[in-house]
Image (spheres, helix red, strand yellow):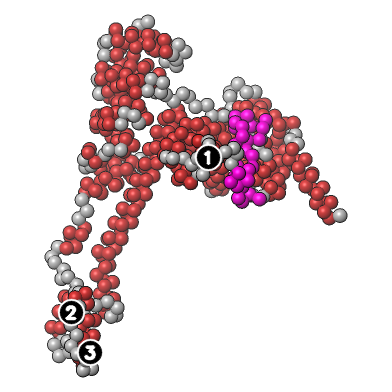
Amino acid sequence: MEREQMNGQSEQRDKDIEELPVRLQRAVGIIRDGVDVRWPAGHVELALIRLQRRRQQRRTAIAGGTLSVTGAALAFALVFGGYVRDELAASGLVPASSSEKASSTSSSQSAPAPASVADSFAKSARARGAPSVVVPAPFAVRAEPPHEGHLLQQRLIPRRQVAAGRWVTLAGERRFGEAYGLLRRVPLRDLSDPDDLMLAADVARQAGRPDRAVPFLERVVKEHPSEVSAQLAGFSLGKIYLDNLGAPALAARSFAAVRAMAPGGGLAQDALAREVEAWSRAGESGRARDAALDYSRLYPRGRRLAAVRDLGGI
Amino acid sequence: MTQGVIYAYGTSMSQPAQKPHLRLVAPGAVPGDASQRLEDLPPADPKAAVEEAFRRYAPLVASLGLRITALRDDIDDFVQEVFLRATRGIGGLRHQGATKAWLISITINVARQRLRVRKLRKLVGLDVPIEYEELVDPAISPEDRLLLTRMYRALDAMPVNQRLAWSLRHIEGERLETVALLCGCSLATAKRRIVAAQKVISEAVG
């Protein structure tokens, strides 16, 4: 009886799941048909570049965090290490350092303290009438006397090393001014990964120094032409030449390079449109026209067709 | 029931209600001859595998995430989060054919997390209201847009697990077994969640 009742409840539940009221069916239909993501051409590639950069940022953030923890541990050891060692020595858990022994020996000549565990072992053995024992070298290890300035030496971490670990973290926190300040201390040769170079270019641009982004972007294009980042770097380079540095001819060549790298890539259409604009601004009306004709042929329904025709004079 | 079972995709996610997308297969029982097909092999280069998966499935992940969470402004970030998680685990995939199903399960987990965070933000008054009407084409009638808004508000009001179960069942058109699998619960629990959610939505939408 009880089992039948349970089966009945289960069947009713299945029926409830399957049957949607009419208005609800309509609402579901609206969501299915209307709520969707339509990414424009090339968006996937750009999103992939962002993913690669974010992955890199996460890795460097972890590295930065490790560096910070290590630094904090080092600072703690510098500040409290001596205190802890003294406390342990006082409680007899570790042998006292030689400087401490020297002071204790001079202050109480009548009752000299054993120099080490090995010494005390040898003395007690002699007192028991045992034959003299030569203490092997490892037992006779003594603390090195501190030399002047050793603490200072431990604190010295090369500034360049700190800058290399920190600028990425600051960039991730969108503190571009500070990140750029540190980035300037990092030698250009230390950056070789395309993601690092792209990030460095971004930092320079966001810090208001687009001219300093140029070397980073040029290196991405030259050293990693097969990477997807190279297309984005070439496009950014063109924009900087065109919009910030007033060098439209260089800009046009950069945009042309983007197209050459990936003629069917997501940036090709925009690069060609910007190339027309750049040649037009450089006063090269013939080249602007040729590029505009290319655009009309390749993208007859292109987003920028009207502007391209206008700039190319066709 | 859910443990020790792997799932494989049959048809495209672009036609939600027509056919079930996932089918359950016994552990180790990979369809066909496993030694003969490239997709049954584990990915050779995890980084390249993630990039390939991104190119193929990022739009799908974005659409699924948007329909379930309705967080339009964060959808790019959502996709990035899914694939960042995928980066960490793709090396452990036994065969490439499971990539899509595996990405869907990550998408559901990320959606669950985002919805919970949003609920928490709402609780402390930090939530930014979402204009649900903007999720669809402006050409859609005002009545339908109102219906959509009511629907998503009702979904917002219910517990996240109920919302996920109901969305997977009715919006994505998944089979109940698949819903249970993706939600990480038993079949009975999945059914209970769907019924509870449906009651709330029916009252809200009318």
Q: Chain of mark 2?
A: A
Q: Are marks 3 and 2 in contact (CB under 8 Å)?
A: no
Three-letter residue code for mark 1: Ser
Camera-side residue: A313 or A116? A116
The 10 Å Cα crowd at callout 3, few under 14, some 14 to 19, many 20 or more, is: some
Q: Chain of mark 1?
A: B
Camera-side residue: B29 or B171? B29
Total labels drawn: 3
Residue A57 placement, left or right of B69: left
Main SS category, magenta section = loop
Question: Is residue B199 one of those drawn in magenta?
Answer: no
Q: Nearer the viewer, mark 3 or mark 2?
A: 3
Where in the figure is residue A105, as x and y percent of width and height? 15, 83
| Residue with the most extreme right position | A1
Measure the C-alpha gap from mark 2 to mark 1. Answer: 73 Å
Residue ID for mark 3: A125
Residue ID for mark 1: B35
